[in-house]
């Protein structure tokens, strides 16, 4: 954050190694949060008061949102997407769309199966509950995941492209010391 610190000259190797350590630390924090959520959900009773996972969810979601926001504002998100699209068989846009559809269908099926198993009294009622809950869940979660994942990805890429274009426009005008 060093707002009032003077800019020091640093060795690029040290900066790169430090950034690699920070990336590894982020992965460790994510693994710890996921482990905590899994332990709280499956080891402890879900109805008890100590089974709150709000902090872990804030860390998981907040870290991802912060990274997306900062990479878009710095203009590196569009470069990451272009690099991914060059090296991958599927484009980032297509992959994000498929993941959002799979998540929506997966959640709908999970809720449908859960309702059929836990709340139905017979086979006919199980089938009815499964299809009813799965259909309603699909109508809720499919648009939700498409909006959250696909639209957010497109907005971040567009903002990152704007930042890169602005940086390129600033570079084309020349240095302040340059005489025209």
Image (spheres, rainbow, N blue to C red):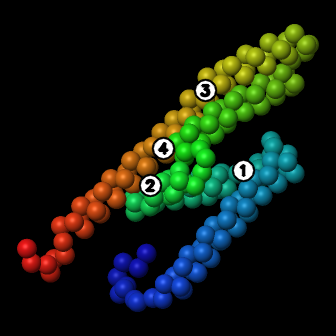
Mark 2 to mark 3: distance in Å?
Answer: 30 Å
Q: Secondary structure at mark 2?
A: helix
Residue 140's label in the rendered image is 3
Q: Which badge, 4 or 1, comes first in the chain's sequence? A: 1
Q: Residue drawn at (79%, 19%), measured in percent from left and top?
A: 130
- Residue 179 in the image: x percent, y percent? 9, 78
- Residue 117 in the image: x percent, y percent? 87, 24
Decide if residue 68 is on the left or right side of residue 44: left
- Residue 69 in the image: x percent, y percent? 45, 56
Which-is-in-front pick, marks 2 and 4? 2
Q: Residue drawn at (40%, 60%), measured in percent from left and top?
A: 75
Mark 3 to mark 1: distance in Å?
Answer: 25 Å
From the image, which quarter does the C terminus lie in? bottom left
Residue 152's label in the rendered image is 4
Q: Which badge, 2 or 3, comes first in the chain's sequence? A: 2
Q: Which badge, 3 or 1, comes first in the chain's sequence? A: 1
Decide if residue 106 is on the left or right side of residue 75: right
Instruction: Specify the farthest residue to the top.
Output: 124
Which-is-in-front pick, marks 4 and 3? 4
Residue that numbered label 2 is attached to: 78
Residue 68 visible: no
From the image, which quarter does the N terminus lie in? bottom left
Q: Secondary structure at mark 1?
A: loop
Residue 52's label in the rendered image is 1
Question: Cβ–Cβ below 8 Å for labels 4 and 1?
Answer: no
Mark 2 to mark 1: distance in Å?
Answer: 36 Å
Residue 3, by quadrant, is: bottom left
Residue 145, by quadrant, is: top right
């Amino acid at each position: 954050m060093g707002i009032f610190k003077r800019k020091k000259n640093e060795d690029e190797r040290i900066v790169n190694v430090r950034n690699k350590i920070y990336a590894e630390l982020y992965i460790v924090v994510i693994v710890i949060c996921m482990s905590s959520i899994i332990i709280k959900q499956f080891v402890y009773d879900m109805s008890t008061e100590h089974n709150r996972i709000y902090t872990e969810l804030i860390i998981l979601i907040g870290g991802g949102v912060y990274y997306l926001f900062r990479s878009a504002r710095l203009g590196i998100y569009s470069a990451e997407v272009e690099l991914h699209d060059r090296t991958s068989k599927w484009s980032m846009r297509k992959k994000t769309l498929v993941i959002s559809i799979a998540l929506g269908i997966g959640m709908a099926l999970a809720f449908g199966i859960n309702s059929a198993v836990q709340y139905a009294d017979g086979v006919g009622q199980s089938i009815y509950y499964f299809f009813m809950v799965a259909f309603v869940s699909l109508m809720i979660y499919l648009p939700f995941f498409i909006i959250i994942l696909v639209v957010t990805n497109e907005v971040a890429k567009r903002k990152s492209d704007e930042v890169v274009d602005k940086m390129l426009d600033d570079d084309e005008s020349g240095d302040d010391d340059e005489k025209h």
